[in-house]
Amino acid sequence: MDTLLKFPSYAKAFIVLIGLYVLIATLSIMQEILVPLIFSVMIAVLLHPVVNILVRIRINRVIAIILTLVLTFIITAALAVLIFRQLAQFTESWPILVDKFELMLNQTSKWISQYFDLSRWKVNRWTTNAKTEMLSMSNAQVGQTLYALGGWIVTLLLIPVYVFLFLFYNKLLIEFIHRVFGNSDQDRISKIILEIKSVIQSYLAGLLIEAVIVAILNITALLVLGIEYAILLGILGALLNVIPYIGGLVAVALPMAVALATKSTPMFAFYVLALYYLIQLIDNNIIVPLIVSSKVKINALFAILVVFAGNALWGVSGMFLSIPLLAIVKLICDHIESLKPWGFLLGDTMPPILDIEPILKKMKIKIKVKDKK
């Protein structure tokens, strides 16, 4: 007769920790395989409605997929060419910006040394070292940047192939998922798949629209202030804004630094900060609720934690993928009874505040009754 092994609680906790360690190590080792696949799945889910529209007007499915990918490639390539042109101009002007930044630092150091009674020599040495590091950084990182760009180019070449295959074998993959689980869970599996598709489509489409609107607002604000490289900084700010909480800080720091280095007065940096703050208010209170709002809500605590975890695991790609992946995990937890507490923990639904006054009154009454006895 078979007997079930019962492990103590500490042994179960140890096994869970070992399992988590193996999972994280596997995800880290397989980064070059998993990241393009996950991006491809999300892009395929996003483009799937476009392919269906073309199929409905009696276009062959393969041709419909190719047309959709070609249109997506043209839009992406046009945006990439615009960014790289602006980036090339910015790179050529980098030494000039460093010199202007050094001049501003010298003026600031003079004021600091006089006001705080510090040694001018020490402050000047610090500014000279800062300039040397900035110039050496720009030269030394060229090779690293080219190497990283090479890896990104290979990934970008793989993604369209993966997207085509995912769109072509869409029904096969969904049928496989259904066959993996028992007949009793088919309705639940269908519901989870439909909701995951809906979440990915609404989230990614909303992010694209949000990025376009924020980019237009950023560029307009920078052009009004006369900040150089307004198009590059505006687009980069919109892309960084996709990363929750952290991206917005980096997005405003870049144009502020350019304003400090190129403008005659530091007030322009404060103008940039004020306009970007106004854009963030518009984004958070109007654009996000109307366009990016999703059925799955993630609380701020786990959103920040998962962004840092994604960066530690997969770098910048992990930061972009962290929120949609966490939303999918929460959605799955909400449909499995044993995992519903975890889904509740990840969500932003606050439980009602317990009114303890009636409980305290009852406790006092009971205590008084016992005292009388």
Image: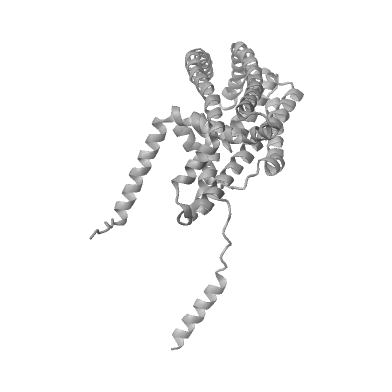
Residue 197, image x, y percentages: 58, 42
Q: Is residue 203 visible?
A: yes
Residue at left 74%, top 28%?
Answer: 221
Out of 178 and 260, give the one closest to the viewer: 178
Residue 185, image x, y percentages: 49, 53
Q: Please indicate whether residue 164 sits to the left or right of residue 25 in the image.
A: right
Q: Is residue 111 above or below residue 275?
A: above
Out of 261 and 252, give the one closest to the viewer: 252
Residue 219, image x, y percentages: 71, 25
In the orientation shown, which residue stands out farthest toward the bottom? Answer: 373
Q: Is residue 117 visible?
A: no
Residue at left 45%, top 51%?
Answer: 182
Residue at left 46%, top 31%?
Answer: 34
Residue 184, image x, y percentages: 48, 55
Q: Quadrant of residue 218?
A: top right
- Quarter of the picture containing the N terminus is bottom left
Q: How many marks?
A: 0
